[in-house]
Amino acid sequence: AQKITQTQPGMFVQEKEAVTLDCTYDTSDQSYGLFWYKQPSSGEMIFLIYQGSYDEQNATEGRYSLNFQKARKSANLVISASQLGDSAMYFCAMREETDSWGKLQFGAGTQVVVTP
Amino acid sequence: DGGITQSPKYLFRKEGQNVTLSCEQNLNHDAMYWYRQDPGQGLRLIYYSQIVNDFQKGDIAEGYSVSREKKESFPLTVTSAQKNPTAFYLCASSIQASGSRDTQYFGPGTRLTVL
């Protein structure tokens, strides 16, 4: 069963606007971590932001913030004041405490295109 | 600069040949991972290693092999037994393998094409 679901395959956003990327997850673990990565066309996966399941506050890192709704099992990424350099693929991922491998489970990604 | 390097960036292989992808990290991380990415998809785990001289199969290990003789290095061999090896390969590392909090950091990737 798919553990991470990203329902938006692609979206356009205008420069300086905010954009929200959806992510829902499925786990029976009490302790887990949620991660967002950015993958530009060069291919490298760039870590953006982390949210722990026990963190009471939503995570923020510069222009990135995470809208964490635990009861709904959603962890949406908000990018404020979009820039042309934000054009990339964005992946949501989860790491479960009971997974001794430390495996990251990825969603299919959302392609974001920022237009002038 | 601390980070993860992968080489080569692009690799072409004839069918029936084995090929080795390099991954080196100078972050002093214990755990290292290999992922495979196919077009339009997320990443899938091939192999992981928690410590030197130890490694475990991930979800799609068939047709691949690894070694971990040094903490800094985790090379991946794509063997001729791998049915569909054309893909983008990403290496990652984290401080340790266990725990939900540790962030995995990725290298720039190797794009393998089988001709």
Image: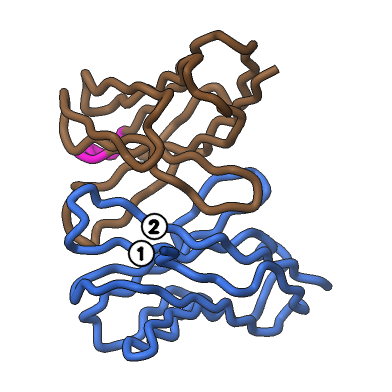
Task: Determine the colour of chain B.
Answer: brown
In the rendered image, residue B76, in percent from the top left (x then y), is placed at 40, 23
Q: Residue at x 31, y 24 (%)?
A: B73
Contact check, label 1 and label 2, Cβ < 8 Å: yes
Q: Secondary structure at mark 2?
A: strand
Question: Which chain is rendered blue in the image?
Answer: A
Which quadrant of the structure image shows residue A79? Answer: bottom right
Q: Residue at x 16, y 33 (%)?
A: B51
Image quadrant holding the C terminus of chain A, namely bottom right
Q: Secondary structure at mark 1?
A: strand
Q: Reply above or below: B15 against B89.
A: above
Q: Residue at x 65, y 20 (%)?
A: B114
The answer to whether tags 1 and 2 share a subunit is yes
Image quadrant holding the N terminus of chain A, namely bottom left
What span is colored magenta in the figure?
A: B26-31
Between residue A27 and residue A49, name the one nearer to us: A27
Q: Amino acid at mark 2?
A: Gln
- A50 horizontally vs A76: left or right: left
Residue holding disc 1: A94
Q: Main secondary structure of the magenta part?
A: loop
**Pointer 2 indicates a residue of which chain?**
A
In the rendered image, residue B105, in percent from the top left (x then y), is placed at 38, 48
Callout 1 environment at 10 Å: few (<14), some (14 to 19), or many (20+)? many
Q: Reply above or below: A1 against B87.
A: below
The dot on residue A105 is 2
